Amino acid sequence: MSAMWETQKALYDTLSEDSTFMALINNRIYDEPPTNEQYPFVVIGESTEIRENRLNQIGYETTAIFTIYDKSGGLGTYNIKAIYDRMNTLLNMKRLSMDNYTMVICMLDNAFTARDGDKRLMNVRYRVIAH
């Protein structure tokens, strides 16, 4: 059984259950970037997975990529960095609850900002190890 879907559900649940995080993005967290959406919002996007077996125990390392979108006018990347800061507080070096797995840890891999016309973006990559 792959851990990709279980990882996405655990990440989504962790973020969506935090009222501070959801207030920062006005309750807008998606699996697919919406069209004509209001800003800011977060997309749980691409993921990869590799086997991480240890001591006769099946495991996986899943990498999940989040993209934070904003149109902040003169604020530059301030808003996306505030959203990222709360996201990182909730996810980095935290144990997640996942069905069918007993040991799960989430770790920040990297993050970077970009500009796309009048939009500000931040891509954030987390690694989740599940056994």
Image (spheres, rainbow, N blue to C red):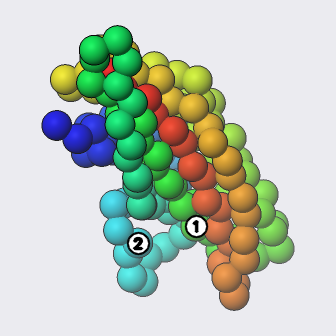
Quadrant of residue 68 in the image? bottom right
Residue 20 in picture, x, y percent from top left: 54, 37
- Give the mark, 1 or 2, whose residue is nearer the N terminus: 2
Residue at the image position 35 percent from the left and 37 percent from the top: 51
Q: Is residue 118 above or below residue 75?
A: below
Please say if the residues under marks 1 and 2 sit with CB atoms less than 8 Å apart.
Answer: yes
Location of mark 2 (residue): 33
Give the secondary structure at mark 1: strand
- Badge number at residue 98: none
- Badge number at residue 69: 1
Quadrant of residue 88 in the image? top right
Tag 1: amino acid: Tyr
Instruction: State whether residue 76 appears in this view.
Output: yes
Give the secondary structure at mark 2: loop
Between 14 and 19, the residue placed more toward the observer is: 14
Q: Is residue 78 above or below residue 101?
A: below
Residue at the image position 40 percent from the left and 52 percent from the top: 48
Horizontal side of residue 119 vs 65, given as left or right: right
